[in-house]
Image (cartoon, rainbow, N blue to C red):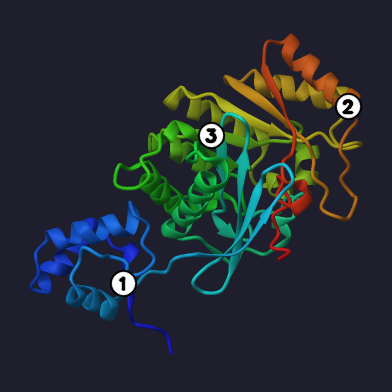
Amino acid sequence: MKSKKKDIRALTKEQLREFFVSSGDKAFRGNQVYEWLWSKGAHSFESMTNISKDTREILEDNFVINHIKVDQMQRSTDGTIKNAVRLHDGLVVESVLIPTPSRTTACVSSQVGCSLDCRFCATSRLKRMRNLNPDEIYDQVIAIDNESRLYHNRPLSNIVFMGMGEPLMNYNNVLKAIDKITSPEGLGMSPKRITVSTSGVPKMIKKMADDEVRFKLAVSLHSAIDEVRTNIMPFNENFPLADLKEALEYWYEKTKSRITYEYVVWEGINDRKEDIDALLRFCSYVPCKVNLIEYNPIDDGEFQQASNATIENYINALESRGFVVNVRRSRGKDIDAACGQLANKT
């Protein structure tokens, strides 16, 4: 039988205060519980040691804490860690800790499965089962922060929404999670250290600009030619590049925040001179930088990494036009933790 108890982390601090007042207790008790839930990441009412046993029993009778559980943790030879995260309803998502000498980055998931259909990505082969709640996103970050401190002796420095799912298809919950992550009552992390990566949903990019978000935006682009992009990312038919261009111009006009384009180059797909020329044109619309990302195969062999010579052609063309370009080498490939490989094989 389904529990009638409410998920306590769905309540605001004000609602918690009201609950205690209506129970004949003091309002400040709500502040204490809120701090345990978010700042201290409590997974049980029993662990709230500065609250009386009677009060903890009242909480136990009325609420649940639907916290995540790291079911399996895998460590790569390069220091990358992948977590298989079990949710309260038994579904599983994956999140990744990516270490470099100067930072540790959490790559977090926003959906179980994915709403979109990118053909080169393992996650898109899982149907979207549901959106993650804000606390489930927040819990992934807490778990990775703990691992960063334990295995790399430093707190988490950056967060990217590049795990399973399309973040803009779970917009409200992603924003609520980021509010908690950046709040002094949560992790107190700077929004400038958070990047939300989208495959490109134009109306939601405009909404983010209207909402005056302060985190960074990355776009999974991979081609600036509609026909090619639709072939590898079929949803592009509904959200064509002209609409994406307009949305990104709107974003920059409102936020003055530079966009990052993520771009994988595949042999026989987007490795021609016209592909490079199209990217150069697209990059000229708004201030941006380009991350050329190493491709991580997902078993069927349809997509193959382009040659080093082709990557050099991209780099030379972009740099000659004054664009910032970085080549991103994949981390955690030996544990299927690299970009595009998250598919709950565990």
Vertical arrangement, residue 144 with respect to residue 44, above or below: above
Secondary element at image label 1: loop
Kind of residue sitting beneath label 3:
Leu
Please tell me the numbered disc located at residue 217.
3
Closest to the observer: 246 or 153? 153
Q: Do the residues under discs 1 and 3 have CB atoms within 8 angstroms? A: no
Please name which of the two marks, 2 or 1, marks the residue nearer to the observer: 1
Q: Quadrant of the C terminus?
A: bottom right
Q: Residues within 10 Å of mark 2 (few under 14, many from 20)?
A: few
Visible in this render: residue 112?
yes
Residue identified by numbered label 1 = 46
Closest to the observer: 183 or 100? 100
Q: Quadrant of residue 11?
A: bottom left
C-alpha distance separating marks 1 and 3? 40 Å
Kind of residue sitting beneath label 1:
Glu
Residue 323 in the figure: left or right of residue 146:
right
Q: Residue at x 38, y 38 (%)?
A: 211
